Amino acid sequence: MNTPTMSHTIKIKFDPARPGHMTTLVEGVTGPACRDLTKWLRNLGEVVTDLKTGDHYATVEEEVQASTTVQA
Amino acid sequence: MSNYLEIVTKLDDPAILAQTLREVGERLGFTCEVGTGQLHGFASATRPADFIIRKSQVKGMFADMGWARAADGTYTVVYDDYGRAGGRVRQIMSEVAYHYSVVEAERLATREGYTIQREYNQAGQVIALGLAME
């Protein structure tokens, strides 16, 4: 079972025109934590598309900026 | 949104497949035999299968239909009617693949501790699951 660090929602959509195909959207999670929280989704079958969106990189960019500031 | 996945279901869990066949069968009016048996096809040829719908169960089906476990652990449809698989057979195949993906998603989501909200279309099919983790 997950040990979530933040509340989030997942939408799983099924397409009646393509039986057995589904898409998942994760909301409410920023940064790479999303991948850990939703690792179980990959057990639903063969992943044919895996897209990271802007929210995935948000925290990473902030951390890089903070690190750059400290070094300067 | 931080992650988008497109996933194609693999029929690889016998318990989920059994539940799926039971529920689809209730709606379409057939019962499925569970456990390895002999499936009868064209010209009385037989093949082993793990789940079998006898042709007598479904109007318009001219041979037994089944699912057999392949070497990679997935279940594949077995239907040998000399290439005459009709609309009823394709309907069952589609409904089983569709319903399996819903049942599996609900099972895994429940195990992970999510609360689940179903969305239906006008035909009564589940078209989406909303999962929440507070």
Image (cartoon, rainbow, N blue to C red):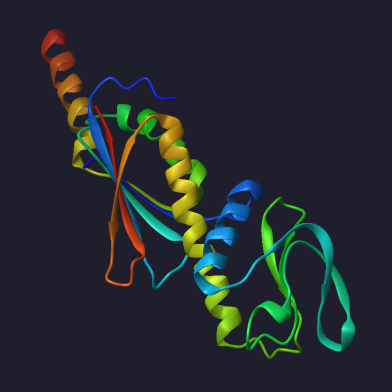
* Residue B17 coordinates in the image, percent (x, y): 61, 54
Q: Residue at x 58, y 53 (%)?
A: B19
x, y (%) of residue B133? Answer: 28, 30
| Residue found at x 57% / y 83% | B88
Query: Residue B82: which quarter of the image?
Result: bottom right
Frontmost residue, A20 versus B57: B57
Tell me if residue A47 can be seen.
no
Does residue A50 appear to the left or right of A59 in the view shown? right
> Which one is nearer the viewer's eye here, B30 or A16?
B30
Quadrant holding the C terminus of chain B: top left
Please indicate, yes or no, whether residue B54 appears anywhere in the rendered image: yes
Left or right: B106 with respect to A64?
right
Is A29 left, or right, of B7 in this rendering? left
In the rendered image, the quadrant that contains the N terminus of chain B is top left
> In this picture, is B1 found above or below B60?
above
Q: Looking at the image, is B104 positioned above or below residue B75?
A: above
Count all numbered tags in the image, as a single digit: 0
Rendered residue at 19%/37% (across/down)? A55
Depicted B100 relative to depicted B80: above or below: above
Residue at 84 percent across and 62 percent down: it is B37
Where is residue A5 drawn, in percent x and y? 28, 19
Image x and y of residue B79, in percent? 72, 77
